[in-house]
Amino acid sequence: MTNPVLILGAGKLGRLALDIFSGNDVLVYGFLDDNKDLHNTEISEVLVLGDINDESYLGIIGNKTEVFVAMEHKTAKEKTVKQLLEQKKTMPVNAVHQRAVVSEEAELGHGILVAAGVVVNPGARIGNHSVIFSGAVVDTAAVIGEYAEIGAGAVINSEAEIGKGAFIGSGAVIVSGVKIGKNARIGAGSVVIEDVKEGKTVFGNPAAEVGK
């Protein structure tokens, strides 16, 4: 990537994205964030310029400036991505840490964050705008849906499927072939040995539905 990047969101994901882009020698133009307390402050010498929807800055997105969406609220993130596609005809770029190991035989979408120490093995598929935190493993032929979040050190074993918007807590293990439904939540350290339905929360070893 040769063009500078504008990061939308100056929270923990934005800071992580900055670290990744800087490590890959990609210039970060600045941040946009709706927290006005951050405006005109610097994060590692990169300025928070204004609000997420500040058109004076969004207007630079295009042929010479890329964009990465690092917003932490999933609904707001989806809305912003939709606006970028419809109004700017622009798809956010990926932020892949230089110390991540991503197989050339894996399939990555757009707008994905892959942190340090992540391993993505051959045949794995990573959906658009998902986030994979440090040290997680996505094994052979596993599928990660759009807007999913995979916590630090989690293991998604071969041929497991993670639905759109699902959250996998740090250190969780999803056994081979298990399917995690859309917007389901898996507690940290859980071992999931059977399918989890859409919207459900499970925790434990073996994982069981919370509140059932």
Image: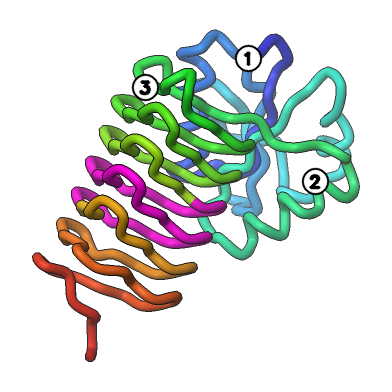
> Quick check: 2 above or below 189?
above
Residue 44 or 15: which is nearer the viewer?
15
Badge 2 is on which residue? 84
- Outermost residue toward the left? 205
Question: Is label 2 in contact with label 3 (beta carbons under 8 Å)?
Answer: no
Q: Quadrant of the N terminus?
A: top right
| Residue occupying the point 48% across, 18% down | 104
Question: Dot 3: few (<14), some (14–19), or many (≥20) neighbours within 10 Å?
Answer: some
Q: Position of residue 75 (x, y in %)?
A: 61, 65
Badge 1 is on which residue? 27
Using the numbered discs, state the Cα–Cα distance from disc 3 to disc 1 in whole angstroms. 20 Å
Does residue 165 belong to the magenta stretch? yes
Q: Main secondary structure of the magenta part?
A: loop
| Residue occupying the point 9% across, 65% down | 205
Q: Position of residue 174 (x, y in %)?
A: 25, 54
| Residue occupying the point 72% across, 48% down | 51
Residue 11 or 97: which is nearer the viewer?
97
Residue 19 or 98: which is nearer the viewer?
98
Badge 3 is on which residue? 100
Using the numbered discs, state the Cα–Cα distance from disc 2 to disc 3 in whole angstroms. 27 Å
Sequence-wise first label, 2 or 3: 2
| Residue occupying the point 33% across, 30% down | 118
Magenta region, residue range? 145-171
Q: Position of residue 109 (x, y in %)?
A: 60, 37
Sequence-wise first label, 3 or 1: 1
Residue 174 shows in this picture: yes
Q: Position of residue 3 (x, y in %)?
A: 73, 14
Question: Dot 2: few (<14), some (14–19), or many (≥20) neighbours within 10 Å?
Answer: some
